[in-house]
Structure formats: structure tokens, C-alpha cells
Image (spheres, rainbow, N blue to C red):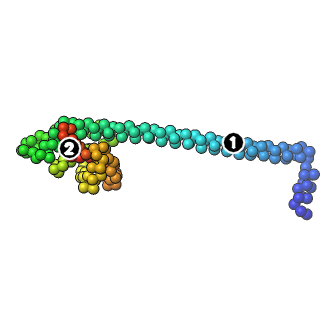
């Protein structure tokens, strides 16, 4: 006997109460499944839309934070290259210090200013000044020392006094930025800031 006939025979032998119960149960289960699928697709669309909105809000905040930190670094650069102690220290270093005392005094003034400039800033790890004569002034919150190779000097020189972002240093996990420093009186190059 085929399966379909068995089902028909089984349905005929059921009580009237059970005959109403089975189709009602099938209708209720179908409606619940339909409502569940609709709710799933609607909630999925809502969650996806909210996720996109949240991601855009986060990206917007990250962009604002980056702009703030970049502006802070630009302000730091401006305060360094316009500082009279920095200007005098680089001019004296290029001219050649007259005595060891003059060199130590200039180095102490410049490096004290540089250290005070970066203390309390979590975006700047260190600041170095390189005179055209090869003297280096620096302040760092880490044990690492940064040198300025000729290739990076050439990149910075192309910036013409503007802040130039260099390739990240994978060893130190930093992104260096540098600029040419010009003498505020003569407008001649006197060094680099990094």
C-alpha cells in the first residue's frame, strides 16, 4: 500500500477533534515560521544599518582625533622653530662654538626647551634638532636615539620648511616627521627638526 493511501486511511480513522487539531497545528506552525523569518530578516537589516552607522561614527571620531593630534604636532613644530634659544643654538652650532662652556650652555638651553615641549604629550616620543654642521640636540622620552640619514634629509629638504611625514620606522613603531629650520633673521637654512 502506497504512503499516500496510508496517510488518507490514518486521517479517516482519526476522531473529529484530532482532524481539526492537525490542520490547526500545521497552520499555527506555518504562521510562526513565517513571522520568525520576517522578524529575522527585518532585525538583520536593522542590525546591519545600525552597524554601518556605528562604524561611520567611529571613523568620524578617529578622523577628528587624528586632525587634533596633527594640529598639535604642527603647533609643536612651530613653537620649536620660532624659539629664540633653538634659533641661537643652531646658529652657534653652525658657526662653531667658541668654547666648551658655550656649547654646554647652548645644549642645555635647547634640550631643556625640547624636553619641556614634549613632556605631557602622548603623541610625541622625541624631538631632535640637527644643525647643518652636524651637531645634534635632542630630547626623548624613550631610550631610542634617532639619526637623520641623507635620504631623509633630502626628503625633508623637498618640503621647503613645511612638516614632512617620513616612512614609519618598523623597529620603533613610530612615524617620524621633520622639517627644515630657517634662520628667522636671514631666512637661510640652519638645520632640521625631527
Helix or strand or loop: what does disc 2 sit on?
A: loop
Residue 99: % across, % down: 6, 44
Q: Which residue is mark 2?
A: 188
Name the residue rendered at 32%, 40% in the picture: 73
Q: Image height check: is 112 above or below 158?
A: above
Q: Is residue 129 visible?
A: no
Give the class, few, some or many, for how many residues have Cα within 10 Å of label 1's Cα (few <14, many ≥20): few
Left or right: 49 in relation to 154: right
Q: Quadrant of the N terminus?
A: bottom right
In this figure, which residue is indicated by the disc labeled 1?
A: 39
Q: Residue furthest bottom?
A: 1
How far apart are labels 2 and 1 at the CA level? 71 Å
Closer to the chain start, of discs 2 and 1, is 1
Front-most of residues 188 and 132: 188
Residue pictured at 44% horizontal, 40% vertical: 63
Secondary structure type for disc 1: helix
Single out the mark in the foreground, 2 or 1.
2
Q: State the image quarter where residue 37 is shown.
A: top right
Q: Quadrant of residue 8?
A: bottom right
The disc at residue 68 is none
From the viewer's perspective, tell me whether residue 50 is left or right of residue 188. right
- Along the line of sight, which residue is nearer the eye, 25 or 54? 54
Q: How many marks?
A: 2
Q: Is residue 61 visible?
A: yes
Q: Residue 139: percent from the left, percent from the top?
A: 22, 44
Relative horizontal placement of residue 36, taking residue 91 as reference (left or right):
right
Residue 26, image x, y percentages:
81, 47
The furthest residue to the left: 99
Above or below, 158 relative to 80: below
Mark 2 in CB contact with mark 1 (< 8 angstroms): no
Q: Position of residue 166 (x, y in %)?
A: 32, 50
Residue at 28 percent across and 40 percent down: it is: 77
Amino acid at each position: 500500500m502506497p504512503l499516500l493511501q496510508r496517510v488518507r486511511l490514518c486521517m479517516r480513522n482519526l476522531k473529529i477533534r484530532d482532524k481539526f487539531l492537525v490542520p490547526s497545528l500545521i497552520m499555527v506552525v506555518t504562521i510562526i515560521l513565517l513571522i520568525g523569518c520576517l522578524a529575522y530578516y527585518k532585525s538583520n537589516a536593522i542590525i546591519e544599518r545600525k552597524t554601518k552607522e556605528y562604524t561611520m561614527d567611529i571613523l568620524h571620531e578617529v578622523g577628528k582625533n587624528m586632525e587634533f593630534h596633527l594640529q598639535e604636532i604642527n603647533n609643536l613644530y612651530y613653537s620649536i622653530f620660532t624659539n629664540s634659544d633653538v634659533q641661537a643654538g643652531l646658529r652657534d652650532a653652525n658657526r662653531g662654538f667658541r668654547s666648551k662652556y658655550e656649547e654646554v650652555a647652548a645644549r642645555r638651553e635647547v634640550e631643556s626647551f625640547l624636553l619641556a615641549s614634549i613632556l605631557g604629550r602622548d603623541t610625541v616620543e622625541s624631538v631632535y634638532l640637527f644643525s647643518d654642521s652636524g651637531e645634534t640636540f635632542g630630547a626623548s622620552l624613550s631610550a631610542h636615539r634617532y639619526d637623520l640619514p641623507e635620504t631623509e634629509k633630502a626628503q625633508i629638504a623637498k618640503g621647503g620648511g613645511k612638516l614632512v611625514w617620513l616612512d614609519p620606522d618598523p623597529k620603533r613603531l613610530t612615524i617620524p616627521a621633520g622639517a627644515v629650520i630657517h634662520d628667522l633673521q636671514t631666512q637661510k637654512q640652519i638645520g632640521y627638526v625631527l
